[in-house]
Amino acid sequence: MKILLIAGHGGKDPGAVANGYKEAELTREFVLSLEKLLSEFAEVSVQDIQKDTYTLLKNGGKVPFSDYEYVLEIHFNAGGGIGTEIYVHETEKKTEVEERIVENIAKEGFVKRGVKKRADLLVMNTCKKQYGVSCALLEVCFIDAVSDMTRYEKKKQMVIQGVADAIIDGFGLRTVQKPVLLKEADEITWELNNRYFKISGYEDFIAVLAEAKKANSPLYWGYYKLVNNIKD
């Protein structure tokens, strides 16, 4: 399964600022941690964390949503409330994964505000309406609530793990094994020789490829992507 993670705000937009926190910094920390937890079970990408995806789309930029099967955007709420909630597009029929997400976060002591449907969020609208890909926006907790942020700092890793578990279990990914990638020079050479073209000077080819790997050379990465069927 291919998943895209988006950290809300960023660039020139810090998002909500309260209690000594900037939303854009919190979302990036959250997304990078979540990526590590999910990568064992799915192909996970993180949208460019140097940019604000909302601003990118608003200014006519593109995000390759069609390359993914699920998109999760991370935010921290503001406005005087407390608790965790998640938004999906109004046309979304299945919300089991999102229900698991808020349930798992609520287990750490946060008020469960539930799954809510909206049709006025640019990133979600673009993803769902133009590309037909399910997208959710998670408001982890309230950045302007001292109680929420105190609890979040204490339970941060458990909250992020809870979100990861909700996605992994909700999509049944624990039974899915990621393909083993061929990384070593001899493995790649064998695969090239048996699937693509006959190699004369077999041992010499392995030695050259091993040196190319050490040098982080495009020669190595070109063959690596070829035998592992990785597209740019």
Image: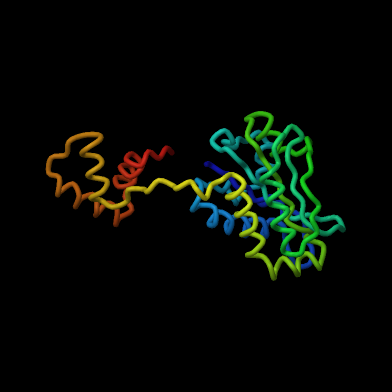
- Drawn side of residue 93 relative to residue 207, left or right: right
In the depicted structure, whether residue 111 falls above or below residue 193: below
- The percent position of residue 23, horizontal first and vertical second, equals 72, 57
**At 73% across and 56% down in the image, what residue appears?**
140
Q: In which quarter of the image is residue 104?
A: bottom right
Q: Name the residue rendered at 59%, 56% in the picture.
A: 34
Front position in the image: 56 or 116:
116
- Tell me if 201 is positioned left or right of 67 in this view: left
Residue 223's place in the image compared with 18, above or below, is above
Q: As rendered, which of 26 and 3 lies closer to the eye? A: 3
List x then y, in percent, for residue 9.
Answer: 69, 50
Q: In which quarter of the image is the C terminus?
A: top left
Left/right of residue 46 with respect to residue 137 in the rendered view: left
Of all residues, the one furthest to the right in this rendering is 80
Residue lying at 74% horizontally and 59% vertically, measured from the top left: 106
Whole-percent x, y for residue 201 in the image: 12, 44
Q: Quadrant of residue 92?
A: top right
Q: Residue furthest top?
A: 130
| Residue at image point 53% right, 41% down | 2
Front one among 26 and 93: 93
Q: In this view, does 143 lie to the left or right of 209?
A: right
How many numbered markers are drawn? 0
Determine which quarter of the picture holds residue 20: bottom right
Q: Position of residue 7 (x, y in %)?
A: 64, 51
Colour scheme of the rendered structure: rainbow
